[in-house]
Image (cartoon, rainbow, N blue to C red):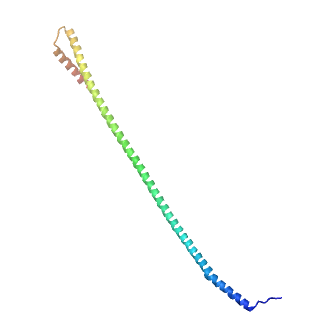
Amino acid sequence: MQIIPEPKVLIVQALGFLLVLGVFKYFLFQPILSILETRRKEIASEYENAEVQRLTAEELKAEYERHLAKIAEETRTKIADAVKEGQAMREEILADSRTQAEKILSRAQDEIARESEKAMVELKTKVADLTVEAAGKIIGESMDDQKHRQMVASFIDGLDEVKQ
C-alpha cells in the first residue's frame, strides 16, 4: 500500500508554502535583515569610535609624556640655577668676610702702632726724668728741668738713629 498524493493537494500545498514563504520574506525576513544590517552598522560605528578614542588617548599620552619631560628639564634647570646662585652667594659672603677681617686686622695693627708710640713716649719721659735726677745727683748741681729734657731727648733720638 502505497499512498500517492493527489496532484491537486500537492499543488495547493506548494502554492500555500510559496505564499507563506513570500509572507515570511516580506513581513519577517525583511525586518529581521534590516535589523541585522542596522546592528552591523552600529557595531562598525562603535569599532570606529573606539579606534578614534584609542588614537586620541595615544596622542594625549604622548603629549603628557612630552609635558612631563619638559617639566623635568625645567626642574633640572632651576636646580642648577639655584646651585649656581648659592655658590655665588657663598663666594660673596666669603669675600665680604675676608674684607671685614682685613679691616679689623688693619685697625688692630693701627691701634698697636698707636699704643706702641704712646708707650715709647711714656718711656722716653720716664727715662728723661730718671736721667735728670741721676745727672743732678752725679753733677751735684741742679740743672733746670728743660735743659735736662732736651739733652735726654737728643740722646734718645741718637739711639733711635743707631737702631735704624
Report how many numbered discs are placed on residues in the image. 0
Between 68 and 86, the one nearer to me in the picture: 68
Is residue 136 positioned above or below 30 on the image? above
Instruction: Report the residue that reaches farthest toward the right.
Output: 1
Q: Quadrant of the N terminus?
A: bottom right
Between 108 and 86, the one nearer to me in the picture: 86
Quadrant assignment, res 126: top left
Residue 70 coordinates in the image, percent (x, y):
44, 56
Residue 66 coordinates in the image, percent (x, y):
46, 59
Residue depicted at 22% across the width and 11% down the height: 133
Q: In the drawing, does residue 5 fall left or right of residue 110?
A: right
Residue depicted at 73% across the width and 89% down the height: 9
Between 104 and 128, the one nearer to me in the picture: 104
Q: Quadrant of the C terminus?
A: top left
Residue depicted at 34% across the width and 37% down the height: 98
Q: In the drawing, does residue 101 fall left or right of residue 79?
A: left
